[in-house]
Image (cartoon, rainbow, N blue to C red):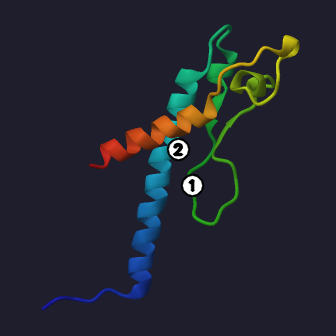
Amino acid sequence: MKTLRSAAAVQQDIRTFFERSVEVLTININDVARALTPVRTGRARAGWQLLRKFKLGSDRNIIENRVPYIGILDGVVPARGGKKRGPIVKPAVDRAVYMTRRSNR
């Protein structure tokens, strides 16, 4: 005889699965962003950090880089002389999603 689980238990399992999946994805994004960040002094690359675990319903950042010039390196803010740098965050997210999907097969 099968035992039925409550809707609350199923909902909690879905929530836990989703939070763990996002946690794996954010770890991958952080690792790839760190690897894609150009190195001159190493400060910008070392600036990537995971702040906290993802919780469903939270609107807090979970990855950040507080180096003042990270926007220039990411190409979001134009550099002096108009030289455009390559993107970091979008390719990091794309590659991390690809890596996460491959590992879940």
Q: From the viewer's perspective, tell me whether residue 37 is left or right of residue 103.
A: right
25 up-or-down from 59: above or below: above
The percent position of residue 94, horizontal first and vertical second, equals: 51, 39
Asked if residue 28 shows in the view, the reply is: no
Residue at the location (44% across, 84% down)?
Answer: 8
Considering depth in this image, is 24 or 76 the residue closer to the camera?
Answer: 76
> What SS does tag 2 mark?
helix
SS at mark 1? loop
Q: Which mark is residue 31?
A: none
Residue at position x 38%, y 79% in the image: 10
Please state if 60 lies on the left or on the right of 23 as rendered.
right
Q: CA distance from mark 1 to mark 2?
A: 9 Å
Q: Position of residue 88 (x, y in %)?
A: 62, 28
Q: Which part of the image, by quadrant, shows the N terminus?
A: bottom left
Which one is closest to the eye, mark 1 or mark 2? 2
Tell me whether circle 1 and circle 2 mark residues in contact (CB < 8 Å). Answer: yes
Residue hosting label 2: 26
Among the two numbered marks 1 and 2 on one chain, the one whose residue lies closer to the N terminus: 2
